[in-house]
């Protein structure tokens, strides 16, 4: 196998993208920027349309709290997401909380990940392969889907893709600053989603493999020290998160074969058609002797974390979920980009990008529908309340039912104008005061309701005949007895009921 002085491997007999010291055209130097801008444009497009869903509403609620309230909550729940909540707390303070603005950090993170995908592809397989890999990454539906998510998954994708590129640079020329940068990327990945740290197993095997071939490779020590230093700040978070794991992940079950098949077939890439294309292209680099070793290394980074999370999830706590494994997408894109670039004639590369674009178009548009994530319209419900509001009104919004996790109350608060001041009549202690995601409810609803003369009751669904059926029996009974008069209004996916004495 012929390897250039840069460490770049020609694919299928092609010359490497550049040689050290060679002058590259400006466009060639900025291919990573094109991939980043393409990913950013696709990620931002339509981000103002889908309504906030339950996980995003939790992020919104946490980010709107003071830092003291936020740390109080993290001591009880969601500690492993605390870094993202803090980021969004300061982001909202600076830029506001419109839909596009609160989702923009994820879009920027995915754009950064695309740049590192392009740079990684270039370093291993040549500049053209890097350009194709970064473009493929941008076109994957799940990339833009989570670029429009007010959660920290995109930041994790950025951190892991950056760590991969930094590792390759450090292996090429071990220097303390390069290993320090790698350690920082490890810390960011762990602080934003601890599960992602399984990528270190794949990185470790890559380092070990290169050391085994040379037996004098100094990078082995550098990797161990950098990884250990990067993990050190995550240890306190891991200890705290361990105490909260039952509440965080108790709803997940061990993945069976069908679940894993669905994960690869659709969930990971966000489209069955794109999944088929990406997986097929990812296998191609393994078929050519030139570049096979690097393909195996990147393949480890794509596959091994998934296998490890699946094995770990067979125990008492499951972690196997598509968005938790999103950080493997950069490695899949690099593999697929190398495979597509290696096809002959070379015209097949741009044609392949067009095919991926068309294959994922339906899923791209589908994820941008207004009700793509939740099938109810809290904005319309808030308008009904605002139009009929009187000072002194109270509100009840799924606080005590088993559907409290839907965060309907947070959604209504987001859409209601500032002039509307509603008393949550069933709450004894607010979520902020309780240091939790949910508030503490009144054990006896009647004294809490007090002399409130009107109460707005919001429920999901479309049952105008039984608007209180989603509520706990003691709550429904008290509301029905104290407020005999009802005015029921249906909006998409929700029912708003005005109860009066």
Image (cartoon, rainbow, N blue to C red):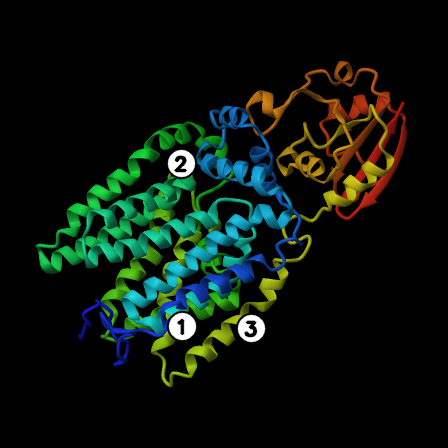
For this view, does 42 lie left or right of residue 268? right
Instruction: Determine whether 272 is above or below 49 in the image.
Output: below
Of the residues under marks 2 and 3, which one precedes in the sequence? 2
**Circle 2 residue:** 316
* Neighbours of disc 1 within 10 Å: few (<14), some (14-19), many (20+): few
Tell me the mark number nearer the camera, choosing from 1 and 2.
1
Tell me the mark number nearer the camera, choosing from 3 and 1.
1
Occupied quadrant, residue 440: top right
Circles 3 and 1: CB atoms closer than 8 Å:
no
- Residue 158, how many percent across, how many down? 41, 52
For this view, does 272 lie left or right of residue 455? left
* Cα distance in 3D space between marks 3 and 1: 26 Å
- Residue 229, how many percent across, how many down? 26, 38
Residue sitting at 60 percent across and 28 percent down? 438
- Residue 260, how many percent across, how many down? 44, 54
For this view, does 74 lie left or right of residue 311? right
Residue sitting at 85 percent across and 20 percent down? 482
**Residue lying farthest left?**
216
**Circle 3 residue:** 358
Instruction: Determine whether 78 is above or below 373 in the image.
Output: above
Closer to the camera in the image, 339 or 271 = 339
Residue sitting at 55 percent across and 50 percent down? 104
Q: Image quadrant for the C terminus?
A: top right
Circles 1 and 2: CB atoms closer than 8 Å:
no
Closer to the camera in the image, 197 or 118 = 118
* Neighbours of disc 2 within 10 Å: few (<14), some (14-19), many (20+): few
Judging from the image, what secondary structure is the residue with disc 2 in? Answer: loop
- Residue 294, how many percent across, how many down? 25, 65
**Residue lying farthest top?**
447
* Cα distance in 3D space between marks 2 and 3: 41 Å
Closer to the camera in the image, 391 or 262 = 391
Q: Residue 27, labelled with which disc? A: 1
């Amino acid at each position: 196998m012929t390897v250039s002085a840069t460490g770049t491997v020609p694919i299928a007999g092609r010359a490497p993208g550049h040689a050290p010291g060679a002058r590259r055209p400006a466009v060639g130097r900025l291919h990573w920027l094109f991939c980043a801008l393409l990913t950013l444009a696709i990620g931002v497009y339509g981000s103002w349309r889908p309504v906030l869903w339950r996980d995003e509403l939790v992020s919104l609620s946490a980010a709107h709290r003071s830092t003291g309230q936020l740390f109080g909550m993290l001591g009880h729940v969601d500690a492993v997401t605390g870094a993202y909540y803090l980021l969004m707390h300061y982001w909202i303070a600076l830029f506001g909380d419109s839909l596009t603005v609160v989702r923009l950090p994820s879009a920027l993170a995915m754009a950064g990940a695309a740049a590192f995908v392009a740079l990684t592809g270039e370093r291993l397989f040549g500049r053209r392969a890097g350009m194709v890999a970064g473009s493929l990454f941008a076109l994957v539906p799940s990339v833009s889907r989570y670029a429009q998510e007010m959660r920290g998954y995109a930041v994790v994708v950025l951190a892991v893709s950056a760590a991969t590129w930094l590792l390759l640079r450090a292996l090429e020329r071990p220097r303390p600053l390069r290993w320090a940068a790698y350690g920082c990327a490890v810390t960011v990945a762990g602080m934003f989603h601890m599960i992602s740290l399984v990528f270190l197993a794949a990185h470790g095997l890559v380092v070990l493999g290169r050391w085994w071939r040379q037996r004098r490779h100094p990078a082995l020590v550098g990797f161990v020290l950098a990884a250990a230093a990067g993990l050190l700040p995550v240890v306190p978070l891991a200890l705290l998160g361990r105490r909260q794991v039952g509440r965080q992940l108790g709803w997940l079950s061990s993945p069976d074969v069908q679940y894993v098949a669905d994960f690869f077939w659709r969930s990971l890439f966000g489209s069955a058609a794109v999944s088929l294309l990406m997986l097929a292209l990812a296998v191609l680099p393994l078929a050519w002797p030139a570049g096979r070793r690097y393909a195996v290394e990147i393949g480890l980074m794509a596959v091994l974390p998934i296998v490890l999370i699946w094995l770990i999830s067979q125990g008492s706590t499951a972690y196997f979920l598509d968005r938790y494994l999103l950080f493997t997408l950069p490695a899949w894109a690099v593999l697929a980009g190398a495979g597509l670039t290696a096809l002959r004639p070379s015209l097949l590369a741009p044609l392949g990008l067009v095919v991926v674009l068309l294959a994922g178009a339906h899923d791209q548009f589908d994820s941008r529908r207004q009700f793509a994530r939740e099938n109810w319209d809290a904005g319309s419900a808030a308008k009904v309340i605002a139009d009929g509001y009187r000072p002194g009104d109270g509100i009840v919004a799924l606080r005590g039912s088993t559907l409290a996790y839907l965060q309907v109350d947070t959604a209504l608060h987001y859409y209601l104008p500032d002039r509307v001041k509603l008393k949550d009549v069933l709450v004894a202690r607010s979520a902020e005061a309780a240091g939790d995601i949910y508030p503490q409810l009144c054990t006896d609803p009647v004294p809490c309701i007090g002399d409130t003369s009107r109460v707005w009751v919001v429920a999901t669904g479309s049952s105008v005949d039984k608007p209180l059926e989603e509520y706990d029996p003691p709550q429904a009974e008290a509301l029905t007895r104290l407020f005999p008069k009802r005015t029921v209004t249906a909006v998409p996916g929700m029912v708003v009921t005005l109860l009066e004495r």
